[in-house]
Amino acid sequence: MPKKSIHTKLVHSGSHASETKAFRVRTINPPVHHASTVLFDSYTDLQAAARGKYSGTSYGTAGLPVQHAFEKTMTELEGGALTKAFQSGINAITTALMAFTRSGDHILVVDNVYGPTRRFCDRTLAKFGVQTEYLPSAVGSDVKGYITPETSLIFLESPGSNTFEIQDVPAIAEIARKRNIVTIIDNTWATPLYLKPFDLGIDVIIQSVTKYISGHSDVLLGTVTVNADRAGTFERFCRTMELYASPDDCYLALRGLKTLAIRLKQHEAAALEVAGWLAGLDIVEHVLHPALAGHPQHHLWQRDFSGSTGLFAFVLKKEYPENRVAAFVNALQLFGLGFSWGGYQSLLTVGKYPRTAATDYNDRTIFRLNIGLEDTRDLTVDLQNGLEHLDSR
């Protein structure tokens, strides 16, 4: 072979390094590929890909090996037929909603759903002729009263964002299945470890991998896992849209899965300890934690869930002016002020969350805590110090 020019050498430097004997290694974790173009071994493979009959990866948007490894793992954990990974939790949610709706549909969404999910339904799906109606946050078999001939989908989140009501998932799923209505649940709070929605009759499961599965507040990723009945529809939609996820984030999510069970045990124990401590304070009216006996749907949590995690909220007996709330929040030293949850550091958010349906918490200030991996004695001391600023002048 003639000697190559320096320009050619630069272009071909490092090509296929992982496939040569010198670079062939066995590692515990999978390699991460960064690619748009994927090369074929032969003309035959190239033509098969052009006809959509190639069994391998034909382009970067089809997902690279570490993404497929992560998706396969999530499919096994969830007990489904197919998983797709996406750039964020909300991207997973919006993709699922688009895949299973069309113009003229009527969908039912629980009132305590994640705020961005609600905004997508109201601002985007509505533009395409999909009507959204909101269900009571603790809906069960009474969902029958909301179903119309145009109802095509029911979206659940149990427990729901910020106020933590639980739905009667098996009852809703049974009613929906008889009418061929697609059921979707955002199962991020419980993860695949503590709730098995497919066993309860659900069709589609969403995880914000950003939260517990990643566990380190450095990943944006989401997954949608579907059962066999819905797999064909969803797979075709994703292929048409050429949706994919970052290989680096998929790698980190796979790594996070290795310690998920251990971390969740600690999050659960710590959250229950802090929640119990808060429940004993005179200043606190309600602690919104499904695993506490005083939670209105605690019996459903006991029936359907095998554990709880580190996210819950509380409501004070008195509504304080904003400057006193600010004094409490600003006095905290260990609780970071930031959105998201599921990471190792404790976080706090504060807000009022108006609902469409009747609720005890309209116009009430909700303090939501993500209990991380710190010592709970330090966390309760920090909260106690902050709460003392509510009535100080």
Image (cartoon, rainbow, N blue to C red):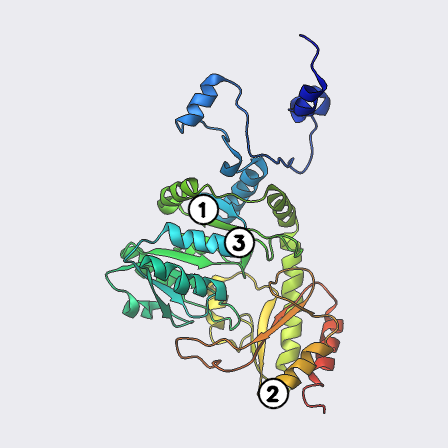
Q: What is the secondary structure assignment of the residue under circle 3?
A: helix
Query: Please, what is the three-letter code of the amino acid marked with disc 2?
Result: Pro
32 relative position to 38: left or right = right
Does the residue at mark 2 contact the one at mark 3 (Cβ under 8 Å)? no
- Residue shown at 38% from the left, 70% from the top: 139
Estimate the x, y position of residue 54 in percent, counting from the top left.
44, 27
| 305 sits left or right of 253 in the view | left
Q: Nearer the viewer, mark 2 or mark 1?
A: 2
User: Quick check: 365 left or right of 235?
Assistant: right
Q: Secondary structure at mark 2?
A: loop
Identify residue type, mark 3: Pro
Q: Are marks 2 and 1 in contact (CB under 8 Å)?
A: no
Q: Quadrant of the N terminus?
A: top right
Q: Is residue 169 in view?
A: no
Mark nearer the N terminus (2 vs 3): 3
SS type, badge 1: loop
Q: Which residue is mark 3?
A: 192
Which is nearer the N-term, disc 2 or disc 1? Answer: 1
Where is residue 370 drawn, in percent x and y? 63, 67
Q: Return the residue found at the far bottom.
A: 393
Q: Which residue is mark 1?
A: 80
User: For the point 66% across and 86% down, which residue is it?
Assistant: 324
Q: How far, Cα to Cα, is label 2 from label 1?
A: 48 Å
Relative to 120, does residue 23 appear above or below in the rendering?
above
User: What residue sits right under mark 2 in the picture?
Assistant: 321
Q: Disc 1 versus disc 3: distance between alpha carbons?
A: 11 Å
> How many C-alpha atoms fall within 10 Å of the one at disc 3: few (<14), some, or many (≥20)?
many
Mark 1 residue type = Gly
The residue lying at 61 percent from left, 46 percent from top is: 249
Q: Residue at x 31, y 59 (%)?
A: 129
**Mark 2 surroundings: few (<14), some (14-19) or many (≥20) residues within 10 A:** few
